[in-house]
Amino acid sequence: MGRDRSGLRMIRQLVGHSAVYTAASLLSRGTVLIWLIVLPRFMPAADYGVLGLVMTTAAFVNLIPLEVGQGMARYYPGAATREKTEWASTAWGFTLVTLGLAALMAVAFSSSFNRRLLGDERYLADFRIAVAYFTLNTSFLFVQNLFRWEFRPRDYASVTVVFALVTLVLSIGLAGTLPNPLAGVLAGLVAGAGIGLVFAMVRLRGAIEWKIDLEKLRRMLRFSLPLVPASLALLLSTYASRFILNDLLTLTDVGLFTWASQLASIPGLMLVGVQGAVTPLVIKHHAEPGTPVLLARGLETVLAGGLWVCVALGRT
């Protein structure tokens, strides 16, 4: 009987958390849909290609802290309250140190990095703005995901909404008013990530301290380091085409391809809520004997629903 109640509670959490994460993610990634409509009015295709390369590079920058956030997630949910703070603080401190070192290197060798990434010196100032975005965006993603491991989907949603709305309003507003629309979009991205980070840190008062426990860091990295090659391989399989296009063709071609690939990614938005909710629940309930069956039934339901949607779209 107790096992049944535990299973029902997990299902309710999965459904409820998935709904919140889906709504937040749809709003956040909905900025891409508006960009698809609005930004081409302000930016030539080549500048949109630069923006696409910057966003792609940001995904790779997320690997600089060596997936330590995944290592934290391994130990965080089942830890006592005080120990949770130590796990989070250590992972956060390591993230800041690695990002800070990478940012200093990127600024010091900005001309070389810009030439290799964008291939045009006229984008050097834009690349330097992008470095600030890389640093703030990865920092924001860390604290945003911490709400998932604390099982605080509403706080996750609130910081996501702040991040998305600030980014959307400022990126489009600055693109439409500044002489260089690309710089305006990048400045909007920096502002969105920065304000979202500050808002999240305020909501996380007491959850993070400024210290690093070397023993906990060693344990997290021992778990997370094997994940880095897999994450890198996934990113390369997803985004390598943009770098190849830039090398073989032009930034204009990259811009057109980026626009088309963003358009094609819209159907996948319907699964992001389930992805956001299921991992913390698995970490928390993995030792319970009924968890594998519940997960299997839940994923079968999601798959069946997705197939039904595809069939319905195909008949329209």
Image (tube, helix red, strand yellow):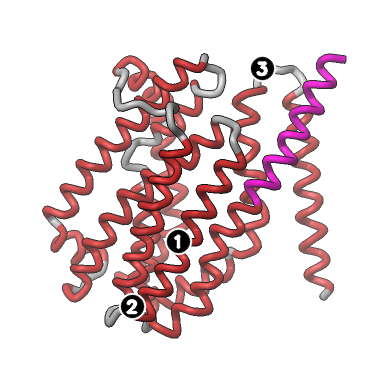
Based on the picture, tell me whether residue 11 belongs to the magenta stretch: yes
Q: Position of residue 16 (x, y in %)?
A: 73, 40
- Comparing labels 3 and 1, the label whose residue is closer to the camera: 1
Residue 280 lies, with reference to residue 22, above or below; the image says above
Whether residue 96 is visible, yes or no, is yes
- Place residue 12 in its image quadrant: top right
Question: Is 303 contained in the magenta span?
Answer: no
Q: Give the magenta part as a residue range.
A: 1-22
Q: Quadrant of the C terminus?
A: bottom right
Mark 2 / mark 1, whichever is N-terminal: 1
C-alpha gap between disc 2 and disc 3: 52 Å
Q: Position of residue 262 (x, y in %)?
A: 52, 68
Which residue is tagged 1? Answer: 166
Q: Which residue is labeled 2 in the image?
A: 181
- Visible residue check, residue 249: no
Secondary structure beneath dot 2 equals: helix
Residue position marked by numbered label 3 in the rendering: 287
Q: Are marks 3 and 1 in contact (CB under 8 Å)?
A: no
